[in-house]
Image (cartoon, grey):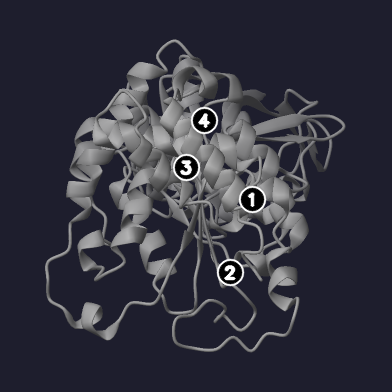
Amino acid sequence: MLAKTFGAAVYGVNATIITIEVAVGQGLRFFMVGLPDSAVKESEQRVEASLKFFGYRMPRQKVVVNLAPADIRKEGTAYDLPIALCVLQSSEQMNTERNLEEYVIMGELSLDGRLRPIKGVLPIAIEARKQGFKGFVLPVENAQEAAIVNQLDIIGVETMQDAVEFFEGKKHIEPLVSDTRDIFMSQLNSYEADFSHVQGQENIKRAMEIAAAGGHNVIMIGPPGAGKTMLAKRLPSILPPLTLHEALETTKIHSVAGKLGSRATLISTRPYRAPHHTISDTALVGGGSFPQPGEISLAHNGVLFLDELPEFKRSALEVMRQPLEDRRVSISRAKWAVEFPANFMLIASMNPCPCGYYNHPEKECVCGPGVVQRYLNKISGPLLDRIDLHVEVTPVSFDQMTANRPAESSQAIRERVMRARDVQTTRFEGHTGIYSNAMMPSQLVKDVCIITDAGRMLLKTAMERLGLSARAYDRILKVSRTIADLAGTDEIRIEHLAEAIQYRSLDRENWAG
């Protein structure tokens, strides 16, 4: 007898429906076909143990499991539950009242028949609704995540026996319903870190506000303990709130990577990722034999913070150059290609030298001649070219640390940032794929960032006297446009240019002596 149901395979951030067929007939042995990997093949042992635990039997006949389409590689343990149910139906040990073919079924079995949570539930649920399935049967720990998708019956089960009784009509399981918009709105501004906790560093807070308003990348240079990490952690709290579309997109990526955790639901705050400097190229950008999103994709619609930037492997930093420009990661192999979104803000920090005290107002640098320059040269020009703001961070004095003056909250800063972003949304309405000043190509910079003759003279003088590089020109114009947006003016004034010029520390000749 033949039994059939459906599962799914996740490639990139999208799912493909997989047909699961089981035929029991004359002969011996268990066969699995359809390009399964080792984890899928091992399901035979898990399925057999689970069946015995609940008093069923594994047929002592020829059992053929087919996973179609057969030319797509199947990976993981999530096919255990649909295979087990099809084995029961094809061996006539289960009389189904509900049709298996109307549901997408996924779940990993323990040896006692309990279901373990799986990865990639949200893209599977989205594809199931798109393909017109009635429902999605899955482990109860993943049900909350799948319930983000409406117009689909989400049936969370704890054991294989629960699933059997559900399809036999012996057990009623109420489909889980979740109000996505209510969940999204209730958690929209739930950030623990706030700029009101930071004493002093007003100039760095200003730079962070400009970065958030224009979507600019930032590098902070300063001695240890100056507050670089503390400030970076608070940047997501002043970014504009996620839209519902962005929240769904971000949740999909975290779901595929298995980072949501059990009983998780929609991500409604901007992600903040801070990988260690020992990270590999693949872990940072994504990939592997079965492609998984890397840290830059997990930071999509949020912030990627790279602390101690020169300590990262040169190769790991260089592979970020294309994603920083294109806002996505393309991973290609001989037989397939996947694409992960990677629209993130890069915030980097570094010491000015190996000892950390070059240019320190009080402590002496002990690095030898040329050491500082060699340290800075670990960061390539092309990567530095994609960072708009270079900010020098100085230590906070004792008086500033102990002062109990109330600092401005993240909410107050965010309101100004959102007003500036609204201006940019209107400005770039007719331009596909451009949403902020930082994303402007060179031609658009010329059209949008128009400066006066006095401003042009100031910029010329700055480039000559400070030894600013040619690559600083466009960056200064973009940042000055953002400063003007924050000020609520249509024209870029001379004071906006002057402020933007000071954020190009690393472009100055002889900065490192």
Secondary structure at numbered mark 4:
helix
For the C terminus, give its image quadrant. bottom right
Depth check, mark 4 against mark 1: the one in front is 1
Going from the N terminus, do you reach mark 3 or mark 2 first? Answer: 3
Q: Earlier in the sequence, mark 1 or mark 2?
A: 2
Residue 291 in percent (x, y) is at 70, 43
- Which numbered marker is on residue 308? 2
Of mark 3 and mark 4, the one earlier in the sequence is: 3
Q: In which quarter of the image is the N terminus?
A: top right
Looking at this rendering, what residue extends furthest in the top direction?
Answer: 430
Residue type (three-letter) at the residue carrying disc 4 = Met
Q: Where is residue 505 in the image (x, y as percent from the top left)?
A: 54, 57
* Amino acid at the residue labelled 3: His
Question: Mark 4 sits on what residue?
Answer: 439
- Distance from disc 3 to disc 4, alpha carbons, whole Å, reads 8 Å
**Can you see residue 12?**
no
Q: Earlier in the sequence, mark 4 or mark 2?
A: 2
Which residue is tagged 1?
384
Q: How far apart are marks 1 and 2 (CA)?
A: 14 Å
Mark closest to the chain's N terminus, 4 or 1:
1
